């Protein structure tokens, strides 16, 4: 791919600019000015879709910033907002002048209200909550209005704290019931347990309030440690997020974490997180990491609290920035961290994970032979499109997949499943190289930089690594590079795509610019970095993957089917668009894709396991959409019990078992004999695949494709004769 010369020129110009500022304090306004100047100039010159910084832009930044500062609307008064609103249409002028007056005013007021709220929540928690009265709590914080008085603010805090405390209260009651039962069982065996003392409900309520108080005290201790730079980062991100959801400013510490995430070498639990509304959500469980080995944390789980092994109570992380929550979740190898999570199905669980060095080896491609009805099929799992940018000759996703295909072919593979589920993307070049394994030659993807002609990225190698039946598995978390490969194979009619209704829908390319390298003689300290969207990619048929993603040929329901996931649910996504298609020829083969797809759809309609999965997905949607909760304990408890009973209907899902047999390749089998960790990873993978209805259907499709090959060959031969 050609380099983005417009962006390169911009970097060079700024690198030699004399716009350095000297500061003795971190909060020196000159450094603020420099930061705004660099960020806005870069976005104006390098972003794919530069925004007009006008009054409308100003209003959007205003709303986004205040929502980030006070998402639960429990700090600011309506009078504060009214005072701030005189700047609502002036922020564009301030941004153009690199002026942070609005930020300074809101920051000072925020600190004041934060300090005042400490007294409010302590006063509220001094008094018992009455869980016998009928009142409800709504978690639709976006519908709240700002309060007009301290009395109203205190009532809002009371409502929110009662909601937090009722969960603690229920946990304590359940724990006491378990302890009393255990003591009674011991007593029946002639052993007395003096340590268990039954507490009254009033005592448990007081203890529950104490837990809430301790969590808030710890949260405020963390919030008070936040420096001005942390809040300035929130303001700058409110500006840059108006461009698109993948453009972000990284303050120095965030940039370090970003680099660690890219390198994959860090100590922690092995999970990627993202803030959705005001809750930290699991976006990926890194294969081979501590959370993966522990087997309980899942994509979609929401982290509510974090507890260290040497602390009695957990820290509430709801409302916390992702980067700040990560500080508490990560930690030294060998230490335990307990996460209180809201599962995808709405249940609350405590999950304890022992931190370790997160090895990224399991992000590499891996393969297995699958035996079905005496036939051999191959499956390759590719978690991401990795590449070593410092050494392009080092291993990458394309070279590794090619090697796995060759090994599978050597052992008699008759069809291939390429699993791209949960693959969030990666290197664009590896996609082009990989697509070439399955076609003779031709375009793979089209790339468009704003203001420049489109560029068609081609496979020019006429050799084909695999010309047999091919199925690609995707889901809602298959994004970016995954979507490019799936789309290209679909457009060529080279593979059948099986999975969710559509993939994630990310059709953009980003770059990360180190702001420090762009200022000569910088004496202002580390400025951070900017990630911004510089290009859009398009299918070879001219359509964009943006928002719409790749539509599966065969749609199979999963537990996320009805949950709002994907680019279209992000804030300020770039629009879908279309360009001229590239010149390409549909794959010339004897495989009958249309007949195979029709047979698969018929099979899916009759599959009882998939019907249950679809019912489960609808139930998960209902649970996640619930936003009104009773604060009457009897009603609260009854609601929990109903959910638990409904959940039992879906226990059969985990018991599903296919008749497939998975075998390691001979080369890997030798390695497994010497490496017990690798052996455990592969056994875990094979066990998971043996319960996977999606893999089962992929193999059915491969078998059908093989059958159509023979039929179409005979038809073609008879026509010739």
Image (spheres, helix red, strand yellow):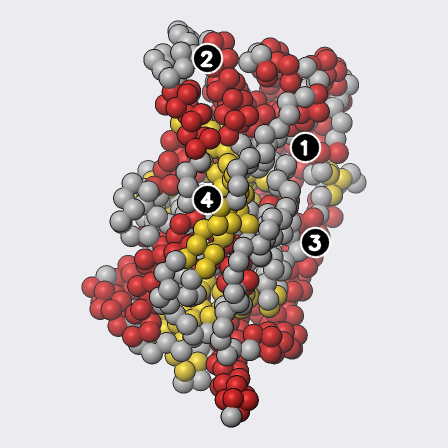
Q: Residue 674 appears at what percent x and percent y?
A: 20, 64
Residue 19 visible in rendering: yes
- At mark 2, the secondary structure is helix
N-terminal label among 3 and 4: 4
CA gap, disc 2 to disc 4?
Answer: 31 Å
Q: Residue 130 appears at what percent x and percent y?
A: 72, 35
Residue receiving disc 3 = 622
Q: Which residue is drawn at 36% across and 56% down?
A: 398
* 3 or 2: mark nearer the eye: 2
Label placed on residue 31 = 2
- Label pair 1/2, CB-CB below 8 angstroms: no
> What quarter of the picture does the N terminus occupy?
top left
Label placed on residue 272 = 4
CA gap, disc 3 to disc 4?
Answer: 25 Å
CA gap, disc 3 to disc 2?
Answer: 48 Å
Q: Residue 468 appears at what percent x and percent y?
A: 43, 74
Residue receiving disc 1 = 160
Q: Which residue is drawn at 60% across and 10% down?
A: 101
N-terminal label among 1 and 4: 1
- Label pair 1/4, CB-CB below 8 angstroms: no
Relative to 132, residue 51 above or below: above
* 1 or 4: mark nearer the eye: 4
Relative to 374, residue 458 above or below: above
Q: Which residue is drawn at 32% across and 59% down?
A: 400
């Amino acid at each position: 791919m050609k380099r983005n010369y417009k962006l390169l020129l911009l970097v060079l110009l700024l690198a030699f600019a004399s716009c350095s500022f000297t500061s003795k304090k971190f909060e020196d306004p000159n450094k603020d000015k420099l930061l705004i100047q660099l960020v806005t100039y870069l976005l104006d010159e390098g972003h794919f879709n530069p925004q007009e910084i006008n009054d409308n832009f100003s209003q959007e930044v205003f709303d986004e910033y205040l929502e980030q500062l006070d998402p639960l609307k429990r700090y600011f008064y309506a009078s504060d907002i009214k005072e701030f609103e005189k700047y609502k249409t002036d922020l564009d002028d301030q941004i153009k002048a690199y002026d942070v007056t609005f930020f300074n005013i809101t920051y000072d007021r925020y600190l004041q209200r934060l300090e005042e709220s400490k007294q409010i929540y302590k006063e509220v928690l001094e008094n018992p909550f009455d869980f016998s009265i009928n009142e409800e709590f709504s978690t639709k914080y976006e519908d709240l209005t700002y309060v007009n008085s301290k009395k109203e603010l205190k009532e809002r805090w009371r409502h929110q704290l009662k909601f937090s405390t009722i969960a603690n209260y229920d946990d304590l009651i359940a724990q006491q019931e378990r302890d009393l039962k255990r003591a009674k069982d011991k007593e029946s065996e002639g052993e007395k347990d003096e340590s268990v003392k039954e507490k009254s409900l009033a005592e448990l309520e007081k203890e529950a309030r104490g837990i809430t108080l301790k969590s808030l005290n710890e949260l405020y201790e963390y919030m008070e440690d936040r420096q001005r730079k942390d809040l300035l980062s929130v303001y700058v991100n409110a500006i840059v997020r108006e461009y698109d959801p993948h453009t972000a400013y990284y303050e120095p510490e965030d940039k370090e974490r970003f680099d660690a995430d890219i390198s994959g070498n860090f100590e922690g639990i092995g999970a990627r997180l993202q803030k959705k509304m005001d809750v930290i959500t699991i976006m990926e469980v890194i294969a081979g990491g501590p959370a993966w080995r522990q087997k309980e944390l899942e994509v979609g789980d929401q982290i509510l609290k974090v507890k260290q092994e040497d602390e009695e109570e957990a820290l509430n992380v709801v409302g916390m920035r992702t980067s700040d929550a990560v500080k508490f979740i990560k930690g030294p190898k060998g230490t335990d961290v307990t996460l209180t999570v809201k599962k995808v199905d709405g249940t609350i669980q405590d999950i304890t994970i022992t931190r370790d060095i997160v090895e990224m080896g399991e992000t590499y491609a891996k393969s297995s032979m699958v035996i079905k009805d005496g036939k051999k099929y191959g499956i390759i799992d590719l978690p991401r499109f990795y590449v070593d940018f410092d050494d392009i000759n080092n291993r990458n996703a394309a070279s590794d997949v090619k090697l796995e295909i060759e090994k599978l072919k050597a052992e008699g593979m008759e069809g291939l499943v390429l699993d791209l589920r949960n693959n969030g993307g990666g290197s664009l070049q590896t996609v082009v190289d990989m697509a070439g394994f399955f076609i003779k030659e031709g375009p793979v993807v089209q790339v468009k930089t704003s203001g420049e002609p489109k560029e068609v990225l081609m496979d020019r190698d006429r050799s084909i690594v695999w010309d047999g039946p091919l199925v690609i598995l995707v889901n809602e978390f298959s994004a970016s590079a995954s979507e490019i490969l799936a789309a290209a194979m679909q457009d060529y009619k080279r593979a059948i795509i099986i999975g969710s209704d559509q993939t994630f829908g990310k059709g953009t390319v980003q770059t990360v610019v180190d702001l420090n390298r762009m200022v000569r003689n910088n004496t202002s300290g580390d400025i951070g970095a900017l990630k911004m969207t510089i290009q859009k990619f398009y299918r070879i048929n001219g359509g964009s993957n943006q928002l719409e993603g790749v539509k599966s040929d065969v749609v199979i329901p999963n537990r996320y089917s009805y949950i709002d996931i994907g680019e279209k649910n992000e804030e300020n996504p770039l629009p879908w668009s279309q360009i001229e298609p590239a010149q390409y020829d549909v794959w010339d083969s004897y495989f009958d894709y249309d007949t195979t797809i029709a047979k698969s759809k018929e099979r899916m309609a009759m599959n009882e396991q998939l019907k249950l999965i679809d019912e489960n997905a609808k139930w998960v949607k209902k649970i996640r959409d619930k936003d009104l909760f009773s604060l009457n304990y009897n009603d609260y408890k009854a609601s929990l019990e109903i959910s638990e009973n409904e959940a039992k209907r879906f226990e059969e899902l985990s018991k599903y078992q296919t008749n497939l047999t998975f075998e390691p390749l001979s080369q890997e089998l030798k390695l497994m004999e010497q490496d017990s960790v690798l052996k455990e990873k592969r056994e875990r993978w094979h066990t998971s695949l043996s319960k996977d209805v999606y893999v089962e259907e992929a193999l059915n499709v491969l078998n059908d494709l093989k059958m159509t090959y023979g039929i179409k060959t005979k038809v073609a031969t008879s026509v010739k004769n």
